[in-house]
Image: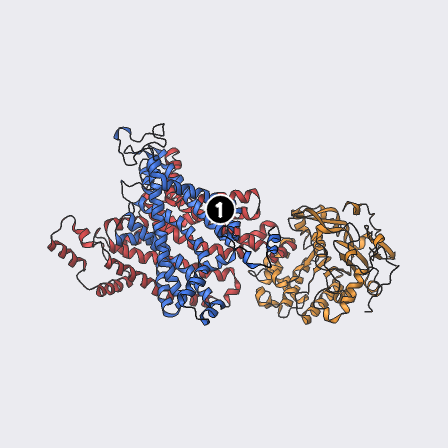
Chain colours: A orange, B blue, C red
Amino acid sequence: MSALETVPPPAAADGADGADDAVLRTTDLTVEVSTEHGWVTIVDGVDLTVGRNEIVGLVGESGSGKTVTSLSVMGLLPKNARISRGTVDVMGSRISALKERQLADVRGVKAAMIFQEPRRCLNPAFTVGDQVAESLRRHRGWSRKRAMQHTVELFELVEIPDAARRVRQYPHEFSGGMCQRVMLAMALACDPMLLIADEPTTALDVTVQRQVLELIRRLQGELGLGVLLITHDLGVVAEMCDRVAVMYAGQVVEQGAADALFHDPSHPYTSALLQSMLEPTRRGEPLGFIPGVVPPPHEFPPTCRFQARCAHAVDEQCRRPVALRELSAHHLSRCERAGEIDLPGVTP
Amino acid sequence: MTAAPVSAHDGDPATVRPRRWYQSRILRRLRRNKAAVFSIVVLILIGLIAVLGEWIAPQDPNKVELTSRLMGPSGAHLLGTDELGRDVLSRLLVATRVDLLASAQAVGLALLVGVPLGIVAGYAGGVTDAIVSRVIDALMTLPPLILAVVVVAILGPGLRNAMLAISVVIIPSFYRIVRASTQGARSELYIESARASGCTSWRILWRHILPAVAPPLLVQASFSASVVIVAEASLSFLGLGARAPQATWGLMLNDASSNLTTASYLIYPPTVMVALTILGFSLLGDGLRDAMGRQTTDGGR
Amino acid sequence: MVMRMISFIGKRLLLAVPTIVLVTFLVFLLMELSPTDPAATLAGDNPTPERLAEIRAALGLDRPFWERYLDWGAAALHGDFGVSPITHQAVTSDLMFRLPITVSLVVLALFFAVVMGVVLGTVAALNRGGAVDWAMNAIANILLAVPPFVAAILLVLFFAILSPAFPATGYATLSDGIGPWLQFSTLPALSLATIPGALLARQVRSALVDTLEEDYIRTARAKGLRRGAIVAKHAAKNAAPPVVTVLGLVLTSMIGGAVVVEKIFAIPGLGSVSVDSVLNGDLVTLQGLIVVVALVVTAVNLAVDASYGYFNPRLRAR
């Protein structure tokens, strides 16, 4: 692991160059988790930027560290995890340096988050309206009545029909898709500029998935939000995202504009993901195309981390840590052999 | 860690020895639970006192010595003497047997009544179940100690009747567990197939239902033992259980409470014994429940 | 909503009636079979057969069992539990005098138990796995091992004899004022509260630990609520039902515990009367007491069941 720390951080090169324009910027973000093997690094040196008015996709298999990355952006890491290196800045606030109390003032105001399985994310014991209004009362000090009135407007914004009546209902009276709309209304209540969506449609029916995605897209455009969309579904990325970062085993392995990355992937892992997307029989099982699994964090190798599963691995070159390097403007790859091997992409 | 020797015997089933009871998963888990090990050690010690109490008692527990009444702990009387000059330590040791034996009787009797009732109700279902369950519900509308007092009122005071009363109090908990487990076991497929293959009802009972019922029952029995200790002490304390000059923890507590201002040292020995015994049984119950895992709590509901 | 609630309570009350009738019948039957003869108890030592027969006739014991039970039941329906052959008092008015005494004692004990349980349980849950959690568990286990009457004796020793902060025995009703009532009720209520407090603490801890793992707690954090608000609002309401279940159980057992504790503190409540009537062979009073206690227990169970709908909106639809 220590060998990796000597790798120089890659030059900041992505779509949102101007620092003023970034709603989210992580620099060398490294997260450790306490396990029976001691403190183990599960997210390693992630540099990520989300600008105003853009959707950035964060893609990878389960175990790649994408959810942990998103939780650390919100300061929501579980007790047994910590940011051990690097920084997270959201709208000028250094999240990674804030105490829990200060974090609570930022959450929901500067950055908000929606999750997988929206029904489980709403408290069954309170009305949905109460749960949305709660955010307004907490951050803006509004009265119950005023917060409720605005909640009705928020419900209309997220296209929940019959909003005035629905705010008084409980989560169990809502479908999964409707619950995700409630979550969106809650997230957007205090006008944050950054929305983190962690697998927002994975648990939903296919038709509902599309509606929710379209809603996110529309709101993002109207409100000029920066959205970090975490997903394992490259189809969703293709439809939604301006830029993409692909994660594998705690590292970003490829990053760039969505079109370029789909067209001309420069990391074997990205390419394999794209191929698995094309394989219609395999669409059900996420990324089943690539043999093997992501190694557990305490077994991340000190070499190229994908090498064991890579069809293009060559002994000498791939047996050492690989840095993320810029191939062309705004296109980064963590493959030693990028450029020398020809990787198939897809045509959107 | 046993993977290698087991696989070595794979081809020859005759040499694979069955696991002994003390190698079982439940016991292994129990041994890892510090609180459970502590409780077992405490209970074994208390059990030893109960068995040996009469012989290791330094003096005759009932020997009245009016010249040495209410004397604090000293070399001659390690825990002092009570208001009749009897040696507290000797009484405490002898009382241990009386209390444990009485508790064992109460739990045993409750098992003897509750288990068959539960099996019959759970296995037969229908009207039988409805009637028995109704009666048990009726018993449970009264708080445990009130129920015990009522039964004592009917039977008359005395240690034996107090024990009967207490067993009536704890019958419902056994009944409910056994009934639920029997219903569960009955509906499971293996019973159906056992019946189809011509097993007699008794055989089904013995081979299939009792093993399913035993673990949650064991847990409940442990918890009930601590309930019984409390109830027995309470009834004796009230004068509804054991009568003087018999030595029991409840009576010793009663003696102590009437001499509280002058001889407060009397209160501690029986308190410690009662508390340790209850603690032992409830920790053992917790440990057993945890060691047996989820199925126990399901059956208990 | 209100209508549904009323019909729910009505249905439950109707269900409770046969159980209570069955209780009284069982007790009546058992008393009939009982080897203790109330007439013999009343007649004192060495009564003449004539004297015994006289007392039997006076108690109505010469009439058939069924007739006596039905008479008693008909009177009980009108709230008349008869006259005690020992004290010659009307049982109903005696019990109605004692009921508020026991209820106020048990309510105070419940208050202590809830405070103890919620504080210990919440602190333990928020420090799960740590030293504080371990210490809370140890305290709960020790409290569980002290029966109420032993707790009562120890409390009297420490807080009435060694440091006389409270009176050792006696009673003041609420109508004597809150101050005197608290003076006399604190120690008995505390001795009733130890085991329930420990049981509640365990239940609060485990329910909170489970609830705090839920996804909606993460949502509450994500919208910037403070930890106190999350625990007090979002976790508490979802963790409440199992705790309320235990609350109902401990409330019932407290009424039983009052039997001994009232005796120790010389409080003239239902507990005292139950012991006295057993010792005096006063089965008429005991019979009335059983009905009153069964009614109280039924009411508690009903309240517990009714509360589930408040805590869990999903149940209201059913």
Locate residue B38 relative to residue A263 in the image: left or right.
left
Compared to residue B117, the image places residue C202 above or below, namely above
Percent position of residue C312, x then y? 52, 61
Residue at numbered disc 1 = B36
Q: Nearer the viewer, residue A171 or B254?
A: B254
Q: Nearer the viewer, residue A106 or B214?
A: B214
Q: Is residue A236 visible?
A: yes
Q: Is residue C171 visible?
A: no
**Label 1: chain letter:** B
Tag 1: residue type? Ala
Percent position of residue C30, x then y? 27, 59
Percent position of residue A50, x then y? 77, 56
Percent position of residue A235, x then y? 75, 67
Compared to residue C180, the image places residue B141 above or below, namely below
Q: Residue at x 73, y 64 (%)?
A: A287
Compared to residue B219, the image places residue A291 above or below, namely below
Picture mark count:
1
Q: Residue at x 44, y 46 (%)?
A: C112
Mark 1 closeness class: few <14, some 14–19, many ≥20 residues within 10 Å: many
Q: Nearer the viewer, residue A296 or C126?
A: A296
Q: Nearer the viewer, residue B4 or A338?
A: B4
